[in-house]
Image: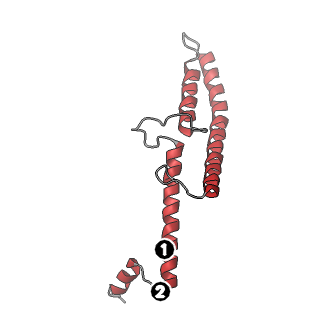
Amino acid sequence: MSGNQPIQNPRLQLLREVAVLQIKLLADGMRDAMLIPISLVAAIVGLLRGGDEPEREFRRVIKLGLRSERWINLFGHHRPLSKVHPAKSLDEVLEQAEAVVIGQIRKSRTAGEDAKTGTETKSEKEEEQEPKSS
């Protein structure tokens, strides 16, 4: 769960941490796989272009790699990107996704409990009150 509401059950907390690590490892691996050809192309472009700064393109790829490493934050050692960045870190994206999933689970549980007890939801009551047009 998010930082403000830690999971009480240690087993659920472990499952959450394992899932987050697996997602981060996948993202990190995909980033590495993409940086391999990008860095090679950047180096070749720099060598062919020549000039005073043949390493310019390659250094830009390195900066991109460092920035993405900070965004993925695989082991939690980096601080998030700037506050104006829409997705400060992968952690924040995962927390938002987790909040949506938990909200949906709670809604479905509430709806299931209402169905068992015969309680109508607000939307069901509104549908009954609307005149039917046939």
Work out whether 89 lies above or below 128: above
Q: Name the residue: 53% across, 66% down.
A: 105
x and y, in percent, of residue 19 in the image: 63, 51
| Badge 2 element | loop
x and y, in percent, of residue 10 in the image: 62, 55
Work out whether 102 lies above or below 94: below
Work out whether 123 lies above or below 43: below
Residue kind at label 2, given as amino acid type: Gly
Q: Name the residue: 48% across, 54% down.
A: 5
Around disc 1, counting alpha carbons within 10 Å, would you say few (fewer than 14), some (14 to 19), or many (20 or more)? few
Which quadrant, please, contains the C terminus? bottom left
| Badge 1 element | helix
Please tell me the numbered disc located at residue 110: 1
Q: Name the residue: 55% across, 56% down.
A: 7
Disc 2: which residue: 118
Position of residue 125 in the picture relative to residue 36 (left or right): left
Taking the view exactly as shown, the residue that stands out farthest to the top is 52
Foreground residue, 115 or 62? 115
- Mark found first going from the N terminus, 1 or 2: 1
Q: Name the residue: 60% across, 54% down.
A: 13
Residue kind at label 1, given as amino acid type: Thr
Please tell me the numbered disc located at residue 129: none
Taking the view exactly as shown, the residue that stands out farthest to the bottom is 134
